[in-house]
Structure formats: C-alpha cells, structure tokens
C-alpha cells in the first residue's frame, strides 16, 4: 500500500478523533479540506479547535512539523512557512505508535519543528 503524506495524515486524524471520542468529547470534522483546524471537540461548555500532527522519528528525538502544510504554509511573499497561532487552533495533538501528545498552540508559534517530550504526553484529555 502506498502511504503518501495525505493518507498518513488522514489516518492520524482518525486516530485522534477516536481518542477524543473515547475521552468523552463530541468531535466535529469540517466538510471541506483546506480549513483552519482539523477538528472541533466539544465536551460540555469546553470547546477545542484541534490541529492534528503525525509525529516522526528524527535522529535523536520524536518530532512534529509545527508549521502549516505545504499547500497553505507559504506567506504571500513566498518566504517562510507560517506557524500555527492561537487565532487558528487551541491545541496541537500529535500521534505516533499509539501515543498522543497535547501541545498548547502558543508553544509552537513561530517554530517550524518541535521535539515531543514526556511533558506533552497524554493518556486522556
């Protein structure tokens, strides 16, 4: 099976959706593709705009690309990719090998990549 980045990303989104649903969240996914966040999770009065990232093993650590994808990443001047901001999303949830990391968006602002540490590891949300 050919696992291109879109398929891998879609699988990660489904894993996060299931993780959130199992933790009592109602999860809503946008009908169109190029949206500001991947899903919205609601539990009672709590609402989270969620961006999903697939973690990858770098030489020394597990990491995520913390900038937007290539299709929406470039600034209008064609230079640096745009990182996520609190205007877009509340939390980045990364997944890899059955584990999940929850990173507040303000901690990835201005960054292109980020190392995942135990600090962000979550078993429920």
Image (cartoon, rainbow, N blue to C red):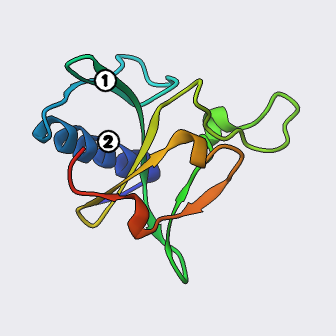
| The quarter of the displayed image where residue 2 is located | bottom left
Front residue of 69 and 113: 113
Front residue of 122 and 81: 122
Residue visible at 50% across and 77% down? 61
Which element is circle 2 on?
helix
Q: Position of residue 19 (x, y in %)?
A: 19, 45
Which element is circle 1 on?
loop
| Quadrant (top left/top right/bottom left/bottom right) for the N terminus | bottom left
| Quadrant (top left/top right/bottom left/bottom right) for the C terminus | top left
* Total numbered labels placed on residues in the image: 2
Q: Position of residue 50 (x, y in %)?
A: 40, 33
The answer to whether marks 2 and 1 mark residues whose Cβ atoms lie closer than 8 Å is yes
Q: Is residue 104 above or below residue 37?
A: below
Mark earlier in primary sequence (2, 1): 2
The residue most toward the bottom is 60
Give me the disc on residue 13.
2
Q: Is residue 69 visible?
A: no
| The quarter of the displayed image where residue 79 is located | top right
Give me the disc on residue 87.
none
Q: Is residue 31 visible?
A: yes
Q: In the figure, is residue 108 to the left or right of 30?
A: right
Give me the disc on residue 29.
1
Q: Position of residue 118 (x, y in %)?
A: 39, 69
Whole-number angstrom distance, CA of label 2 to CA of label 1: 10 Å
Q: Position of residue 9 (x, y in %)?
A: 39, 47
Residue visible at 32% across and 41% down? 13
Q: Is residue 119 above or below residue 28?
A: below
How many residues crowd mark 2 within 10 Å: few (<14), some (14–19), many (20+)?
Answer: many
Residue visible at 52% across and 24% down? 36
């Amino acid at each position: 099976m050919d696992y291109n980045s879109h398929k891998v990303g879609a699988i990660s989104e489904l894993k996060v959706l299931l993780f959130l649903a199992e933790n009592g969240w109602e999860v809503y996914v946008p009908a169109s593709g190029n949206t500001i966040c991947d899903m919205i999770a609601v539990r009672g009065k709590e609402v989270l705009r969620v961006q999903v990232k697939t973690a990858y093993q770098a030489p020394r650590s597990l990491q995520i690309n913390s900038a937007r994808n290539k299709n929406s990443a470039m600034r209008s001047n064609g230079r640096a990719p745009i990182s996520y901001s609190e205007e877009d999303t509340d939390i980045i949830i990364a997944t890899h090998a059955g584990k999940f990391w929850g990173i507040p968006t303000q901690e990835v602002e201005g960054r292109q990549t980020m190392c995942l540490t135990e600090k962000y590891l979550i078993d429920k949300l």
